Amino acid sequence: MTIELVRARQVVTGIRDRFTAEVLDDAAVAHDAGRIVAVDSFATLRAQHPDAPVQHFPRHMLLPGFVNAHHHVGLTPLQLGSPDHPLELWFASRLSSRDIDPVLDTLYGAFEMVASGVTCVQHLHPRMAGPAEGVVAGCMKVLGAYSRIGMRASFAYSVREQNRLVYGDDTAFCATLPGDLGPEMLAHLRRFSLSFNDQMAVYAALRDAHAGSPRTRIQLAPANLHWVTDDGLMTMVEQARSDDVPLHMHLLETPFQREYARRRTGTTAVRHLHRLGALGPSMTLGHAVWVDEGDIELLAHTGTCVCHNCSSNLRLRSGTAPVNAMARHGIVTALGIDEAGLNDDRDMLQEMRLALRIHRRPGLDAADVPTCAQVLRMATEHGAATTGFRHQIGRLAPGLRFDAVAIDANAATWPYQDDQVAPLDALLQRAKPQHVDTVFVDGDPIYAKGRFKYVDRDAVLAEIAQMLSRPPSGAELRRRHLAEAVMPHVRAFYDGYLQGA
Ligand SMILES: [Zn+2]
């Protein structure tokens, strides 16, 4: 055993309930090659391990590493040329995004996540051009980039079977487009269409390639109700059960999706999933903005998890998820930055604050609105519960992996913070990424004092700048044209869609 002690002014071991964080003063974590052996006062651990090396964070709070529980890409759609639109139009506008190397792209997102304290990401990969072997190779590049930087990744290639552009059949929709636009659009969609069996083969190949991997887990992601058939969905649910992996599914992101579910199933999306037998603790619903009270009760009753993607919901005009009601029902609710946060980046500290603030509905009862402890639990233990690392991360407790972030509390609260406000509450409301001192994954300080241990951030950013400074390729220009040309037809598809809903 090679025990190391990591000592901090305060150690947050976890969250007991919405109002209570478990915080130890002048405490330490004892870990053995990344496995937590004990968490206690420094004096106690020093007595037990007199010769162990000590890393000391005298001005810092040490917290469980954050989990960004819903992420897709590195460079943001906005950066790549696709501005914020309502979600249904944004799907079309995203066609115009520039191409970017998957390794550089993944590193870009990872830089921002890690620098804000994220140690584990739930990466739901969007479509890639086929065939299956090429998709597997692309996913391996993404996972290789996470492993290069040292970050934990729970990964899924999002499965889509149908309705790739609008909430209706691809061929039927393309047949309504004028001139050459229909065949062009259909050809584009087909380039990104793998058969269901091929998509399951991608999952199996990635799963087998990462069996026993310490920092990578492979799971399943039925992309959204409109993108999958009931048979496909249930095949994935069965596969997830037999492999004991979680599922993450976008659901009810917008009122259009609620209406789509009503037209397809005659009931709500959540009741439909329940009827099929798809709900349960292994299922996480991303967004879940347009759930009703009965849906929330079903989610609570079945132990289904939710991932709250607050920034994305605002940016794509999706609405505000009923997080207070979910909390009242005790639903495990993770936090995801999705494509990008309010500042078009991946700042988990800001995302927590946004979740803390946006649900502060008028009233006097503090029990009705999110607490600091609650949003921290969303970003740690609850997020962890939705990934392939459930039960292994999310708290600082013996037996778990030592994933943690040390934040310089003095710097974050400089020049003054009154102690009538609990230190954790003050930190969560004031800390910025520049106050993140060190980020540990498996006890390894992969980021410290603004530098990544294994990757030269400046060099990667320079490479991205250089690659994208080239003029758009012929293929990129064709997609840009396609996006512009199809946009009015997509808009027209949804005209009146909600009437009578
Ligand atoms: Zn998403």
Image (spheres, rainbow, N blue to C red):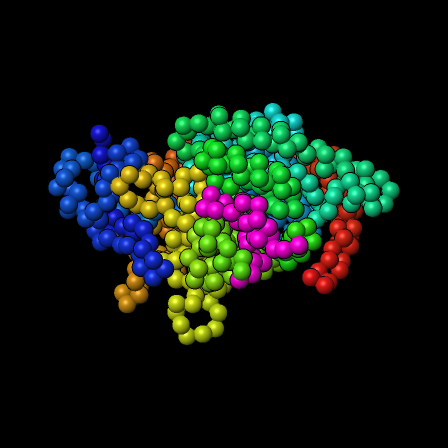
Left/right of residue 180 with respect to residue 217 in the rendered view? right
At 38% from the left edge and 35% from the top edge, which residue is drawn? Answer: 453
What residue is shown at x 20% (from left), y 47% (from top)? Answer: 40
Q: Quadrant of residue 254?
A: bottom right
**Residue 171, image quadrant:** top right
Compared across the picture, whether 317 is left or right of 297 comes to right
The part of the image, by quadrant, that contains residue 216 is top left
172 relative to 114 in the view: left or right = right
Q: Position of residue 144 (x, y in %)?
A: 49, 30
Q: Is residue 182 visible?
A: yes
Magenta segment includes 45: no
Where is the N terminus found, in terms of image quarters?
A: top left
Please name whichever residue, 318 or 16, is drawn nearer the observer in this view of the structure: 16
Is residue 290 within the magenta segment? yes
Identify the residue shown where x is 49% and y is 54%: 299
Q: Position of residue 103 (x, y in %)?
A: 53, 32
**Residue 479 image point, x, y percent:** 73, 40
Against 365, residue 440 (above or below) is: above
Q: 356 above or below 172?
A: below
Q: Could you tell me which quadrant the C terminus lies in? A: bottom right
Task: Report the front residue among 70 and 2.
Answer: 70
- The residue nearer to you, when weighing 487 against 282, is 282
Q: Tally the marks.
A: 0
Residue for point 44% across, 31% down: 148
Magenta-highlighted residues = 266-293
Q: Position of residue 368 (x, y in %)?
A: 43, 67
Q: Is residue 116 visible?
A: no
**From this viewpoint, which residue is outermost toward the right?**
179
Q: Nearer the viewer, residue 214 or 414?
A: 214
